[in-house]
Image: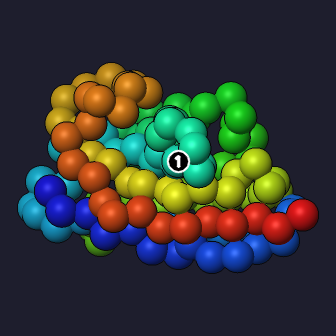
């Protein structure tokens, strides 16, 4: 599946952003989708994931309670709503897709990746 992320930008601390990821293909609902992020000089880290049906979600501890992942299978899109943003959230955010079942936080187990969208949170 091909992925296209969008929605990044510059936002002050405490603000909100909504990222979107558009996917190609007719079997979107069979993919677990994930969001990852990579800050300068750091490894790409897990942010959130959602099951194909949208009923199962999981989050990194650092974003739990502030970020919400959702999906619209009719539109082949997945979203990441980010509230109460902090400067530490500054990173390039990537969406990723994985065939299979179960919550997976390991980036190496995701099959397809989007190009990334920059999120910058100013203090």
- Residue 104 vs 8, above or below: the answer is above
Q: Circle 1: is it few (<14), some (14-19), or many (20+) Cα within 10 Å?
A: some
Q: Where is mark 1, residue-wise?
A: 38
Q: Can residue 36 be seen? A: yes
Please report the residue visible at 52 percent of the width from the left and 48 percent of the height from the top. 37
Q: Is residue 78 left or right of residue 85?
A: left
Check the image and name the residue furthest to the front. 41
Q: Is residue 4 left or right of residue 91?
A: left
- Residue 97: x and y in percent read 27, 46
Q: In this view, does 114 lie to the left or right of 25?
A: right
Q: Which of 33 and 10 is in front in this view?
A: 10
Check the image and name the residue furthest to the left. 26
- Residue 58: x and y in percent read 53, 32
Q: Is mark 1 on a helix, strand or loop?
A: strand
Please report the residue visible at 47 percent of the width from the left and 45 percent of the height from the top. 36
Q: Please tell me how many numbered marks the rendered image carries.
A: 1
- Residue 69 vs 108, above or below: the answer is below
- Residue 19: x and y in percent read 53, 67
Question: Looking at the figure, which quarter contains the C terminus?
Answer: bottom right
Q: Which of 38 and 107 is in front in this view?
A: 38
Please report the residue visible at 28 percent of the width from the left and 52 percent of the height from the top. 113
Question: Looking at the figure, which quarter contains the N terminus?
Answer: bottom left
């Amino acid at each position: 599946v091909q992925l296209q992320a969008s929605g990044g930008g510059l936002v002050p601390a405490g603000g909100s952003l909504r990222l979107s990821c558009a996917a190609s293909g007719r079997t979107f609902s069979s993919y677990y989708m994930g969001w990852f992020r990579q800050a300068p000089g750091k490894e790409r880290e897990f942010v959130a994931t959602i099951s194909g049906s949208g009923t199962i979600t999981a989050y990194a501890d650092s974003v739990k309670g502030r970020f919400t992942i959702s999906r619209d299978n009719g539109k082949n899109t997945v979203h990441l709503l980010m509230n109460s943003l902090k400067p530490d959230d500054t990173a390039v955010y990537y969406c990723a897709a994985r065939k299979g079942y179960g919550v997976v936080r390991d980036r190496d187990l995701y099959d397809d990746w989007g190009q990334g969208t920059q999120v910058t949170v100013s203090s």
